[in-house]
Amino acid sequence: MSMTSQDMNNLFEKQSFLSKLNLFDWGWAALLLLSTGYVWQQYSSLMDVYEAGILFFTSISIIAWGWLWKPVRLYSISVALLSLFAISLYGNDLALKDTNFFLKFLISGESAVMWMSALYVLATVAYFIGLIIGSEFTNKTASAMTWSATVMGLVGLLVRWRESYLIHVDVGHIPVSNLYEVFILFSIITALLYLYYEGKSKTYNMGGFVLLVISSAVAFLLWYGFGDRGASEIQPLVPALQSYWMKIHVPANFVGYGAFALSAMLGVAYLIKDSMIQHGRNGAIINRIPDLDTMDDVMYKSIALGFAFFTLATILGAMWAAEAWGSYWSWDPKETWALIVWLNYAAWLHLRLTKGWRGRPLAWWAIIGLFVTLFAFIGVNMFLSGLHSYGEL
Amino acid sequence: MSHENSPEQNNNSDQVERQRSNRKEHGISKVLLSFLGSMELAISLFVVVGIASIIGTILQQNQPYNTYIVKFGPFWFEVFRSLELFDIYSSWWFVVLLGFLLVSTSVCIYHYAPPMIREWRQFRLNVSAKSLKLMHSSGSWLSQNNPQKSAQFIQEKLANGGYQSRLKNEQGVITIAAKKGSANRLGYIFTHGSIIVICLSALYDGNFNLKLREVAGQLKPETRDLFASEVPDISRLKAHENHAFRGSANVPEGSTTGLVFLQMRDGFLVQELPFTITLNDFRIEHYESGMPKSFESDIVIQDKESGEKISKTIAVNHPLFYKDFAIYQASFDDGGSIMDLQAWSLENNSQKIMPFKQVVGKSSVIPTSKGDMKLELVEFKASNVQPNPKAKETGRKFKNMGPSLTFRLRDSSGQAQEFINYMLPVEQEGRYFFLSGVRSSTSEPFRYLFIPADDVNSVKRFFDFRRLLNNKQEMRRIAEKTAELSLQSSKALDPQVITQMAVVMQRLVELFNQGGFDLVMNDINEKVPEDKRKDVTDSYFKVLQTILGTVYLEVLQKDGVDISKNITPTQEQYYDDLVNTMGILTNYNAPFFLQIKSFEHKEASGFQITKSPGKNLVYLGCVLLCIGIVLMFYVAHKRIWIIIEPDNKTESESGSKILASGSGDRHQREFALEFQALSQLLDKHFSKN
Ligand code: HEM
């Protein structure tokens, strides 16, 4: 989101992007290409053109992602190793979930999500402690916990994906089809967005605020997934959801939701700091929260990112609807709420850009925006009926 | 709080960029245009459209009008209806709102685009040193080189940084104007232009033309429940009359249709198609849990003019595109399954009803003692998969309860009860029962009646038993016989006592028949003083059991069971279940029990047929929108100016004085860093001034 001066230093010297890459970067690319090659060699006979395209496109995207944001490399490798380990432990026997030590306690779909949940909550607490006592060590621990939680979350989803196939080939599907699954997705995407910002700005003191919203998501997840509803159980897909579109539409949507959530939490921090300053309270804790302008700026960047992804997701949704229901727009409650969310942030962006609004009013608006978003995200499924009937409460 | 002018804007020599074009506009048109293009209007529209949309999601749209009347009462119904709240998204006022948004965006483009295009093409070499010094980021340096050389050096560096530049030499003073990220401006045009493209194409795909024709009196939606063939011409659209529509058709297996229904508020229009659709086969697969896994239809399309035929299988997410039309698998339904039914009367003066056939979705009239009743068959399900309560023992998570029929019985006043009957008996603790659920409104859960299945898995013995209990003559005979038999042992064969007892027995049976054991209890409570009640109750129940037992034996005997031997435990258990069920029959409150003897299953496939010529334009708009947004957010429009004057004070006497300055428009923070990098670079080569 924000560039550091280091990135810029050599801007005006003749230098190509590639020459800035070091040995690790090339090693990373080689590792990914090799694994892709291996997958291709093993499974190419089972793939159609699209799938092959997706494989190579994904692989190249991850390479680029790792080049642009270095921590991604360790992150992806950890996720890949843990997931592969879990999958190899399973073999073809889903029942091992309850007997194998590693699966039962660590990396079955459900256990990994449990670890994710615990780690996010701990990280939230740690970030706040870090903020209050101003300890660098605590902050770094919190950050490490957030990273680990995010690893476990993605491992949980990937392993769950495999588990769905182990139940039955017909049941197998990408785990973004019910509220339980998308809440996991929401948590890890929001966390990644935050971690990106944390890495770039080198301030840990926003962590608690952002992780608060993730912890709430986790609370919902536990209540919803493991309570009476048993939503954590893998359910087969209704015919309308059996589509490639789902694989891109849902994650794109959640980048949007995650970014909006991030901006709202920055809004909260902004308002707290601002009113403290206005009341003349200027303690160490307040000073540790990043300065108002920075937060304002990141809030804007985050909403912009969210808006871009949300627009894309809505368009993908329309295209999917055109294929599944015969109409790209049918004013179904979910669609309509997507429009409402979209208009809301469009208004936000216009006020900032053309009217020059800054600070408090926009911070408030970002917070209200989160409630609008939340309604679009769960409220619609809870209170309104429509074609998007998956994951009803 | 809100700053009308952000600091960025204040000091920004780029300010022209944000200014509207200074086209000559006069008088009213000027006022109107500036109103329509104002940000205030735009934001208000965002908010109003948002709120209207919210109403539309809270108030369920396009329900039958009756539902609304029941919900809101006639007064509010009328108010809401006149505001078109039941079909907001195609209401006049909503479309007008969207129209305003469209106009507002167009005017906005009209205002901003020309200066932006100019901005993006121009390098703006006419800057003064004074204005440069006022900018956020600026700095000055001294160079030993002459202006040309310095300029060349700087231009090179700027090019490295991705800047395009132009150079002007005016009497030895060199001005370099450099810019990058002009595409940002294009982003604005794409984003806002795409909104116009999308809205217009979507409007073209909507049913706006039909509404206009309705107002002109050329069309009238049909609100009655008619067959398509009976719909009058004023509610019909010819095949080529309508450029865009979205309709639905339910086609039973083996049938052909050439039309679709377009829903309009509480009515519909019949739209003829230039082709026919024949459903050859419909297939549905289920998961183990009974949830549909996939459904698909083998259809044949035949062009009405050319006779050309196309066969294809369509499924959910796999539509068929034919000419301008798209045919989607939307749903499935019963296509008129034929049910073979038998009604077993539950009334006391029972009449026998002959077996009959009835098609699902149709109704028939059945005579009962309370007058004729309308039997409406609502839904037939060929299977009912449910979670298996014995999943652990049997290892099967689900069990199939078999076919079921949902039907309603409506009396002459229009009151209806809903029933669900299962065709096959269901196991309960090792015994089998026929289930029938009943409820008086769809919001209630079903209450179930369990009719025990007899030796041959039928309900016959149950109803034989009932019929016998209802037969006064037979009951007198059986009562006397039973009384005689039971008194034999007590050796007091007084005929009067026997008759008395037989009378008591008949009366008890009658009570039992009308209201089960409960009614018998009530009767005792009413008539017998409290101190004797217990004794009387005991003896009455004994007597009742005896006679019911005898009746049961007679029924068995008629069925050809040899009752001289002991009856089997199963038969005994059956008797207990029978008596229990009899006892609660009054709660069932229906004139008969409807048995499903057999059925002929017919399915219908639900198609959605659309013609949306604007679709590709909408997609084009979407692509523009995405590109536009990315350009606006992630391409920063930045400018750098350099003014180089000859400077004779330097050692070389042919040095130069460099003034650099720049602006990052909306991306001041990044630009500040970028300018810092440039400054550091210049620091290395030149000396600070
Ligand atoms: C549904 C309709 C509209 C959408 C989706 C939309 C979307 C956007 C977006 C995404 C931005 C970029 C914000 C940013 O870079 O952070 C923007 C900027 C802008 N919009 Fe709109 N807009 C709409 C209608 C309008 C209308 C009606 C007006 C005129 C009153 C308008 C005037 C502007 C202006 C002046 C800018 C700033 C351009 C710049 O300085 O680069 N927009 N719009």
Image (cartoon, coloured by chain):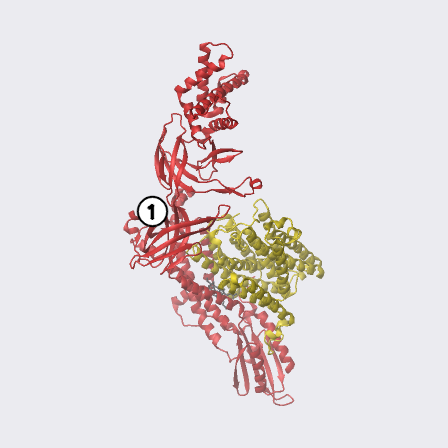
Residue behind mark 1: B223
* Quadrant the N terminus of chain B occupies: bottom right
- Residue B564 in the image, given as x and y percentages of width and height: 48, 21
Q: Which chain is yellow?
A: A
Q: Which chain is red?
A: B
- Residue B668 in the image, given as x and y percentages of width and height: 57, 70
Frontmost residue, B376 versus B40: B376
- Residue A169 in the image, given as x and y percentages of width and height: 53, 53
Residue A132 visible: yes
* Quadrant the C terminus of chain B occupies: bottom right
Residue depicted at x 63% and y 79%: B681
Chain letter for the residue marked with disc 1 in the picture: B
> Does dot 1 land on a helix, a strand or a loop?
loop
Q: Residues within 10 Å of mark 1 (few under 14, many from 20)?
A: some
Residue A347 visible: no
In the image, the residue with mark 1 has its CB under 8 Å from the nearest atom of ligand 1: no
Quadrant assignment, res A265 = bottom right
Residue placed furthest toward the bottom: B653
Q: Amino acid at mark 1?
A: Thr
- Residue A102 in the image, given as x and y percentages of width and height: 66, 53
Classify residue B537 as left or right of residue B333: right
Frontmost residue, A251 versus B47: A251
Frontmost residue, A46 versus B200: A46
B471 over B59 or under it: above or below: above
**How many marks are shown on the rendered structure?**
1
Residue depicted at x 55% and y 56%: A370
B619 over B314 or under it: above or below: below
Residue depicted at x 33% and y 46%: B223
Quadrant assignment, res B389 = top right
Classify residue A336 as left or right of residue B162: left
